[in-house]
Amino acid sequence: MRNTASYASKASQSLGRLYDTGASPTRSEFQRDRDRIIHSTAFRRLQHKTQVFLAHEGRHFRNRLTHTLEVSQIARSIARALELDEDLAEAIALSHDLGHTPFGHAGERALDRAMEPFGGFDHNVQALRVVTRLENRYAEHDGLNLTWETLEGILKHNGPLPHLVDLAELPVPADLRVNTHASLEAQVAAIADDIAYNAHDIDDALRANLVTLEDFLGVPMAGSIVEEVFALYPGIAAKRQTHEVQRRMITRAVEDVIVTAQKNIASAGVSSPEDVRQAGRTLVGFSAGMASDEKQLKSFLFNRVYRHEDVMVPVRESEAVVERLFAAYMADADMPGRWGEAGRAVAGLERARIVADYIAGMTDPYALDEHQRLFDARPDFR
């Protein structure tokens, strides 16, 4: 097994699982977590959940699964360079979107609004619910029975959560300490998520003909790379130029993060995973210059892509689908299988939680099928 730095998480020193599984002769505890996540039902469902562009539009747009795999690859690369535990970084990256609703962020916004009287909806908390309660494949327990470190990373990879509601109802092996930062491996997964979606949202926006490469000239983080690619490859097809821009953006962002993280780790003087949790700040991230550039790139994408009317038409309809489903189930519309059995016995907050779990687990096509079943209507996103 590869040697890691003193500040890296150690599988041999894990705080363990809720249910003892015994030692594996071939895999570390974090490798077992990764494998359990990959084999889960929730992971497979990601292939039918929207990233930004709905799957029916074709053109090989990313979905939640392809996005997750890209995040995982980037996370492993950064973790290796920083001498961290690659398997933990990968496990957290692979699970970071397990709590996402159908229809991407549109579905999440709609479900959060519907759940506002009941405490709201957060996809990181939902991911924790998925891996601790909702997955039900194992003979001896619900959930995936992941290690404390993976659960901590799923919940806190974006930073401390001091205002989080009580997690007492969720079965975890020990206190997840919501007021501290998570491991460096979790921080790596978080920044890998940013790097991946910045690059692939540009690619998907170009595939959708919402923007051209020329539109990115002068846009921080992307513009100088577009100029470089135009100068080096002026005569090649636009799709090849796009791929060159995308891969160079990822490479430069990754290299910036590695250098910046190395400096931050050294200046913080951390020498153990506990030091990292108590550092009081995120140690893995962009340099100040790239962070500023990335913020401006996100602003450009927000205005030119995410709020483009061709995107907003299906977004508005997607939100309406989720809101209608929630209202119908709360008004006693039947939910199939175990969801219906659980929901019929409760009301109010308890029923809302079951309804939210049910809707959040839906794929895009299943949500549309349920809408058709309940309302005899199928939204037209075109």
Image (tube, helix red, strand yellow):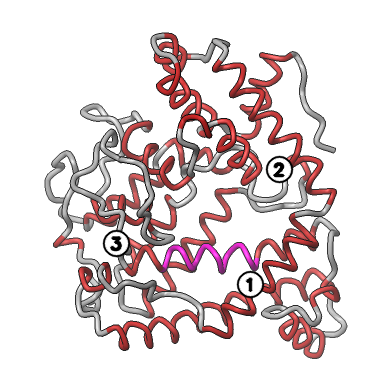
* Residue 196 picture quarter: bottom right
* Start-end of magenta stretch: 188-199
> Which residue type carries mark 2?
Ala
Does residue 374 appear left or right of residue 314 in this picture?
left
User: For the point 18% across and 41% down, which residue is it?
Assistant: 18
Does residue 248 appear left or right of residue 137 in this picture?
right
**Numbered label attached to residue 295:** 1
CB-based contact (under 8 Å), mark 1 and mark 3: no
* Residue 39 picture quarter: top left
> Which residue type carries mark 1?
Lys
Whichever of callouts 1 and 3 sits on the residue coming sooner in the sequence is 3
Does residue 375 appear left or right of residue 125 in this picture?
right
Between the residue at mark 1 and the residue at mark 3, the CA separation in whole angstroms equals 25 Å
User: For the point 58% across and 53% down, which residue is it?
Assistant: 66
Magenta span: helix, strand or loop, mainly? helix
User: Which tag is nearer the camera, tag 3 or tag 2?
Assistant: 3
In the rendered image, residue 372, in percent from the top left (x then y), is placed at 71, 18
Between the residue at mark 2 and the residue at mark 1, the CA separation in whole angstroms equals 27 Å
Whichever of callouts 3 and 2 sits on the residue coming sooner in the sequence is 2
* Residue 85 picture quarter: bottom left
User: For the point 33% across and 32% down, which residue is it?
Assistant: 133
Quarter of the image where the C terminus is located:
top right
Residue located beneath label 3 in the image: 180
Residue located beneath label 2 in the image: 55
Residue 251 in magenta stretch: no
Q: Secondary structure at mark 3?
A: loop
Relative to 167, does residue 220 appear above or below in the rendering?
below
Query: Looking at the image, can residue 48 be seen?
Result: no
> Which residue type carries mark 3?
Thr
In the rendered image, residue 323, in percent from the top left (x then y), is placed at 65, 28
Q: Secondary structure at mark 2?
A: helix
